[in-house]
Image (cartoon, grey):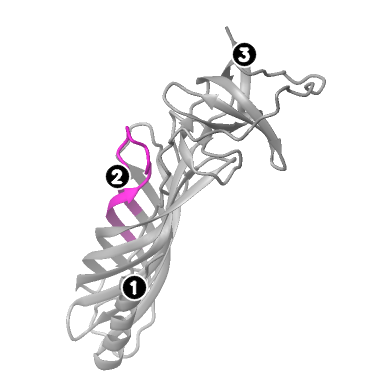
């Protein structure tokens, strides 16, 4: 991941600490609930960690953090989910009273977006801008409750799908604990921490290009007892949502995901160290799938 901007923000925070009247450094963590713009993507549950500085000389806060958005299940693709995790850096303005500290901020996220199932996970860098606002409720001089709302712009998700938008905004609601570390006399202002989410990364998938299949044996060995025998030319339903791969191996490029129940036509197969693989024809692409993902033959 390219974290140049995040490192620059941390360096700026270090310079400000050495040259300004520090209100207090702070650190904390939070439980996060995130939602995407798609109707068929469920709410995800994740967490955030953060640390930052707020200054007495001017109402500015600097913050850096990490967050894991959690798995967001795709209801139209059973077994497939989206996730994003990464680093964040932000600059914000705050206002304070003895009981509460409110703040607004804007920043940059850089992380890994993922899409996949238990069989294959694809990862790609995703970065961009986010904004947020929130409040810290001071329980004591050193402990506060944090509540905040954030929006991350254009986090990648279905990258490489020609018929689906490759990114979406992600809205995050978070609640957690802030620990303040006062460095001296305080005026009633309170340190605040910012939870940052992110994301992601959903990985870029190479578009399927109908690659030439590897040479397959002319005849299929007898299937083990009790296992459904398959043969070239058969129509078969997909028994488990699975990626359509460019090559007969699990880490190959992905054309798209085949949904549960989608019917494909078997063309040829190979057996290698990673199992038995079938070269199949879907409604729009050709590619490889692992034999355990195949289901019943269709008329």
- Helix, strand or loop for disc 1: helix
Q: Nearer the viewer, mark 1 or mark 2?
A: 1
Instruction: Tell me the CA gap for discs 3 and 2.
Output: 37 Å
Instruction: Provide residue 77's location: percent of width, then percent of height.
Output: 47, 30
The residue depicted at 37 percent of the width and 41 percent of the height is: 160
Q: Nearer the viewer, mark 3 or mark 1?
A: 3
Depth order, front residue of 251/169: 251
Instruction: Provide residue 206's location: percent of width, then percent of height.
Output: 42, 43
Magenta stretch in the rendered image: 146-173
Give the dominant element type of the magenta stretch: helix, strand or loop.
strand
Depth order, front residue of 46/243: 243
- Helix, strand or loop for disc 3: strand
The residue to which callout 1 is attached is: 4
**In the displayed structure image, the side of residue 244 where residue 172 appears, left or right:** left
Q: Earlier in the sequence, mark 3 or mark 2?
A: 2
**Is residue 159 in the magenta section?**
yes
Tell me if residue 175 comes above or below residue 159 in the rendering: below
- Helix, strand or loop for disc 2: strand
The residue to which callout 3 is attached is: 297
Tell me if residue 83 comes above or below residue 260 in the rendering: below
**Is residue 156 in the magenta section?**
yes
């Amino acid at each position: 991941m390219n974290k140049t901007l995040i490192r620059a923000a941390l360096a700026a925070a270090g310079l400000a600490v050495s040259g300004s009247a520090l209100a207090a450094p702070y650190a904390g963590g939070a439980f996060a609930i995130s939602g995407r713009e798609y109707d068929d993507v469920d709410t995800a549950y994740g967490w955030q960690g953060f640390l930052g500085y707020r200054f007495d000389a001017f109402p500015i806060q600097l913050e850096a953090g990490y967050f894991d958005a959690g798995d967001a299940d795709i209801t139209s693709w059973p077994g497939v989910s989206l996730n994003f995790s990464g680093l964040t850096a932000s600059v914000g303005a705050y206002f304070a009273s003895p009981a509460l500290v409110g703040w607004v901020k804007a920043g940059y996220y850089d992380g890994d977006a993922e899409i996949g199932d238990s069989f294959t996970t694809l990862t790609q860098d995703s970065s961009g801008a986010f904004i947020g606002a929130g409040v810290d409720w001071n329980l004591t001089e050193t402990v506060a409750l944090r509540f905040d709302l954030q929006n991350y712009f254009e986090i990648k998700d279905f990258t490489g799908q020609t018929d689906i938008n490759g990114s979406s905004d992600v809205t995050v609601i978070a609640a957690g604990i802030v620990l303040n570390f006062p460095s001296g006399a305080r005026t009633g202002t309170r340190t605040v921490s910012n939870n940052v989410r992110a994301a992601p990364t959903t990985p870029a998938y190479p578009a399927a290009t109908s690659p030439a299949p590897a040479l397959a044996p002319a005849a299929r060995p007898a299937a083990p007892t009790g296992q459904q025998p398959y043969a070239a030319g058969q129509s078969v339903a997909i028994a488990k949502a699975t990626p359509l791969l460019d090559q007969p191996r699990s880490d190959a490029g992905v054309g798209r995901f085949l949904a549960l129940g989608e019917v494909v036509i078997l063309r040829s197969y190979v057996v290698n160290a990673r199992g038995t693989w079938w070269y199949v024809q879907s409604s729009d692409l050709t590619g490889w799938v692992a034999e355990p993902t195949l289901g019943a033959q269709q008329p």
